[in-house]
Structure formats: C-alpha cells, structure tokens
C-alpha cells in the first residue's frame, strides 16, 4: 500500500515498470534521440486521413508495442490511464478504444505522462490493479490547429516558442519489472501571471520549482542524491527560469538537471526555437531514453518531473493567465539504496 511521506509525497512498495515503448514522428526521429524510439514514422499523417487520427494512431502504436515487449494481451491490463492536449482528449479515446481496457481519462497538459504513470503506480501498489498502462501523446499539427493558427497561415514563431512533439510514450505498470516507481508527488497549481501563450516555459517553470521543493522537503533529500533530474519540456527559457527560482530558495540543480524539451531536438539544426513541448515530448524521452538507461544500469535513481500549462484557447482569449502544473515520479533501478 502507498504510504504518505511528508505533506505531498506518496511512497510505493510494489509498483514497477514492466515494459515501455516510444513512438515518434519524422522530425523527432531526425533529432539526437532518433535511434532510441521503438517506432518512427517518416510521414506525420502515418497513413491516416487527418492529423487527429494520426495522433490517435500514435497512442495505439505505443500501447501495442509496450504490450508486445512484455508479451501481454490487452485483456491482462486492468486499467489504461491516458490523456492528451486535444479537446475532450480525443487522441486517447479514439486511439485506445480498440483495446477494450477500462479507461481512465486524465488531463495534465504536457505533464500527463507523469500524471498517468503516478496514478497507475498507485493503483498497482494499492492492489486495485494487477497491471495498468499509462500513455499520452501530442502532434505538432493537431496542437497548432487547436491552440494557435492554421499551418497554412505561415505565421512567424517568437523566439520563446517551442515545437510541439509528434510523439507518444506508454509504460506498463505491474508488481515486478526492471525499474521501480518509488515515490510520487502530485503537484500544486502555480501561477505567476504569465499570459503569453507563446512562452510556455515561463508559465510552467514556477510549477516545476514548487513541486521539486515540495518533494525535497517531504523526503529530506537533495538534488545530489539523484543521478539526474528530468523536467518535461520547459525548454531553454523555462530551464533558465527554473534554475533562478530554485537558487532563490538555496537549491542548485547544477550538473543534475536535464530538460526533455532540450533533449529531443537539435536546437540549432532543427529550428525549434526554445525547444520541444507537448505531452509526447517528455513521454517519448522517458520511454525511449531514460528508462532504457535505467534498465541497463547507466542510471539508477532519477526524478522525472513533467510539466504542463493548464490553459485553453478560451481562457487565453478571455485574457486569463496561464496556470502551470508539475507532477513528479521518483524512479529507481531495483537494489538502489534509498536516499
């Protein structure tokens, strides 16, 4: 059963990642982590009739691949937790309906991978599920169409803008596996009044700082107790702001912090401005790069803190600020001493 540690953190005993898979689009497969993905597509429509159907296909592919790597049929999974950026999370509902698995829709914007993985881990650790899948996705074209301008418009992107990843990631949580979910900290909403929808990093950084500080306080640990601390798609602007906010509190991530939005693309060669973003950004980096490194022993104890901007086109048009959220999962290779 999960046990509470401090005010905001839950500690698991029997939650492990049994398998995982990452699927990515053309631009992502051409980036620094291109060789890490289980499935890479050369056409961002993925043979589908629309971009929205392509994103749903991405999720379906990630789940099928993760199940296949564990030699599991869909019926062996008790719950599937998923969400995405589109209205009513249609990528998840349409992509996952063929599996017939009880579905728990989640919304955490770009923090959804940490949210679904954390919730799935609590279900397994509590005994409510034997196995649970956690999955999310994003697609550059679907996000641009919903949140910004039609691609045909050809509008100029600001230097603070980030590139929404066309990617998906899925993990299967079970009572055994090569990577353990040790702790989960669900974040609090943070809002410093940022209203620029083209500056997601600045909107999300306060939430990442808040969640990390809550976690360190709850567990009485420090950044140097971990091999790496991964944030989800803060990009260059948000990463710089995160460092500044934490340093004000006497916490330094120097030598430990890595941002998924800065890992997925080559900023100079691929022209993504401030870096990557989208639910699929941190999900694909987690499943394609971080978890394989943990399974191989290259990493043994990491914090994965995905970040999200809790906005909509309606709230932005009404002049609202952009609240941020960050959920954190502590992952360890079995046998790692507890910090």
Image: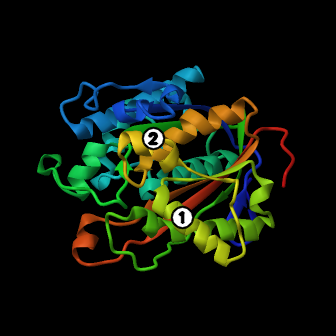
Visible residue check, residue 99: no
Of residues 311 and 35, the one drawn nearer to the viewer in this rendering: 35
- Quarter of the image where the C terminus is located: bottom right
Q: Which residue is mark 2?
A: 266
Residue 131 placement (x, y as % from top left): 60, 37
Q: Which residue is mark 1?
A: 240
Residue depicted at 34% across the width and 66% down the height: 311
Residue 150 placement (x, y as % from top left): 16, 51
- 75 lies left or right of 100: right
Of callouts 2 and 1, the N-terminal one? 1
Tag 2–tag 1 contact (CB < 8 Å): no
Q: Quadrant of residue 208?
A: bottom right
Q: Is residue 254 above or below residue 70?
A: below
Of residues 2 and 172, the one drawn nearer to the viewer in this rendering: 172
- 104 lies left or right of 151: right
Residue 248 placement (x, y as % from top left): 65, 78
Residue 24 placement (x, y as % from top left): 41, 33
Q: How is the image coloured?
A: rainbow
Residue depicted at 60% across the width and 23% down the height: 70
Residue depicted at 59% across the width and 73% down the height: 245
Visible residue check, residue 196: yes
Distance of label 2 from label 1 (alpha carbons): 18 Å
Q: Is residue 137 above or below residue 20?
A: below
Q: How many labels, in total?
A: 2
Mark 1: secondary structure: helix
Local packing at callout 2 (Cα closer than 10 Å; few below 14, some 14-19, many 20+) is: some
Residue depicted at 39% across the width and 31% down the height: 60
Numbered circle sitting on residue 273: none
Q: Is residue 21 above or below residue 265?
A: above
């Amino acid at each position: 059963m999960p046990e509470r540690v401090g005010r905001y953190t839950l500690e698991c005993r029997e939650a492990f990642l049994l398998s995982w898979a990452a699927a990515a689009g053309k631009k992502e497969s051409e980036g620094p982590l291109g060789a890490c993905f289980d499935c890479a597509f050369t056409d961002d429509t993925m043979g589908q009739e629309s971009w929205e159907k392509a994103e749903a296909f991405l999720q379906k592919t990630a789940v099928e691949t993760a199940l296949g790597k564990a030699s599991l049929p869909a019926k062996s999974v008790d719950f599937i937790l998923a969400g995405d950026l589109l209205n009513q999370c249609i990528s998840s509902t349409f992509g996952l309906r063929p599996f017939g698995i009880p579905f728990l829709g989640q919304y955490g914007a770009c923090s959804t991978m940490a949210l679904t993985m954390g919730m799935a881990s609590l279900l397994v650790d509590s005994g409510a599920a034997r196995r649970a899948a956690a999955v999310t996705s994003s697609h550059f074209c679907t996000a641009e169409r919903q949140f910004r301008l039609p691609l045909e418009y050809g509008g100029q992107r600001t230097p603070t803008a980030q590139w929404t990843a066309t990617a998906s990631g899925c993990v299967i949580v079970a009572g055994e596996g090569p990577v353990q979910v040790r702790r989960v900290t669900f974040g609090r909403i943070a809002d410093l009044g940022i209203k620029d929808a083209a500056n997601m990093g600045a909107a999300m950084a306060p939430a990442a700082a808040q969640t990390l500080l809550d976690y360190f306080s709850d567990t009485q640990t420090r950044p140097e107790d971990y091999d790496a601390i991964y944030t989800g798609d803060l990009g260059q602007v948000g990463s710089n702001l995160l460092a500044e906010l934490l340093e004000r509190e006497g916490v330094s991530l120097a030598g430990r912090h890595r941002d998924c939005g800065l890992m997925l693309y080559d900023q100079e060669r691929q022209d993504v401005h401030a870096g990557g973003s989208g639910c699929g950004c941190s999900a694909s980096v987690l499943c394609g790069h971080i978890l394989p490194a943990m399974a191989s022993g290259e990493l043994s104890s990491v914090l994965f803190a995905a970040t999200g901007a809790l906005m909509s086109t309606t709230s932005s048009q009404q002049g609202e600020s952009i609240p941020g959220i960050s959920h954190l999962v502590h992952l360890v290779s079995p046998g790692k001493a507890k910090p």
